Image (cartoon, rainbow, N blue to C red):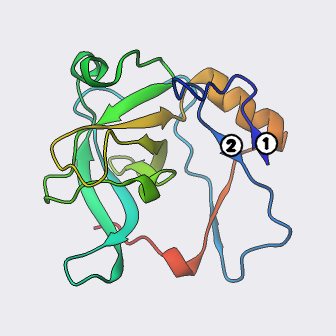
């Protein structure tokens, strides 16, 4: 596993790590969705977050929710310093709240020709709150992109297992 060398556990800054798998995920589809280097997400940009959670009947279920980027000042009031390597996502309007197990889940911008991965969910203030924003790691930040490129020494690819097949609508 490669953890960003500037990762700060106290602030969550530079919160990105890459695992190298011993073998390929069977039947995985490889995509190259990383957001453009240096083009940050913008306030009210819409997208989709995905995760796993316990639903009303107690079963574990995959979820997908439409969300948008929060105002950075409002988010800073709740969480403290939000760096250029972070952004905040408004809670889903579906009444679903994000939880700690959703950390690492994607924030996809669906407005392009193909989905682009702008962020990975980082941390909520508490589990299941449907009125508080969640902090995300900004994957378009040049320092994050440089780390990813250095680890792979090539283009960044993500393999998505059919077990967690996200359907975008």
Where residue 75 sits, quadrant-wise, is top left
Q: Is residue 1 left or right of residue 110?
A: right
Q: Secondary structure at mark 1?
A: strand
The structure residue drawn at horizontal position 31% and vertical position 64%, both measured from the top left corner, is 64
Q: Which residue is mark 2?
A: 17
Q: Quadrant of the C terminus?
A: bottom left
Relative depth, front residue between 156 and 136: 136
Residue 1 image point, x, y percent:
79, 49
Q: Is residue 154 left or right of residue 58?
A: right
Relative depth, front residue between 24 and 169: 24
Q: Secondary structure at mark 2?
A: strand
Relative depth, front residue between 127 and 25: 127
The structure residue drawn at horizontal position 35% and vertical position 69%, both measured from the top left corner, is 53
Where residue 58 sits, quadrant-wise, is bottom left
Could you tell me if the residues under marks 1 and 2 are in contact, i.e. CB atoms within 8 Å?
yes
Q: Which mark is residue 2?
A: 1
Residue 114 visible from this viewpoint? no
- 136 vs 92: above or below: above
Residue 56 image point, x, y percent:
19, 77
- 132 vs 22: above or below: above
Within 10 Å of disc 1 (Cα), the crowding (few <14, some 14-19, many 20+) is: few
Within 10 Å of disc 2 (Cα), the crowding (few <14, some 14-19, many 20+) is: some
Residue 80 image point, x, y percent:
36, 17
What is the C-alpha distance between the residues marked 1 and 2? 5 Å
Residue 113 image point, x, y percent:
41, 52
The structure residue drawn at horizontal position 72% and vertical position 32%, both measured from the top left corner, is 4
């Amino acid at each position: 596993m490669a953890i960003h060398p500037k990762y700060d556990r106290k602030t969550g800054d530079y919160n990105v790590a890459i695992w190298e798998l011993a073998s390929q995920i069977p039947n995985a589809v490889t995509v190259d969705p990383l957001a453009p280097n240096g083009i940050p997400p913008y306030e009210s940009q819409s997208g989709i977050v995905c995760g796993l959670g316990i639903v009303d009947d107690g079963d574990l279920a995959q979820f997908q929710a439409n969300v948008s980027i929060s105002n950075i000042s409002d988010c800073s009031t709740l969480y403290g310093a939000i760096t250029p390597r972070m952004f905040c996502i408004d809670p889903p309007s579906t009444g679903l709240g994000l939880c700690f197990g959703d950390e690492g889940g994607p924030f996809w911008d669906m407005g392009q020709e193909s989905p682009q991965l702008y962020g990975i969910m980082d941390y909520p203030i508490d589990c299941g709150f449907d009125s508080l924003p969640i902090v995300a790691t900004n994957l378009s930040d040049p320092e994050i992109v440089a780390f990813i490129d250095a680890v792979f020494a090539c283009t960044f690819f993500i393999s998505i297992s059919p077990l967690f097949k996200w359907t975008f609508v």
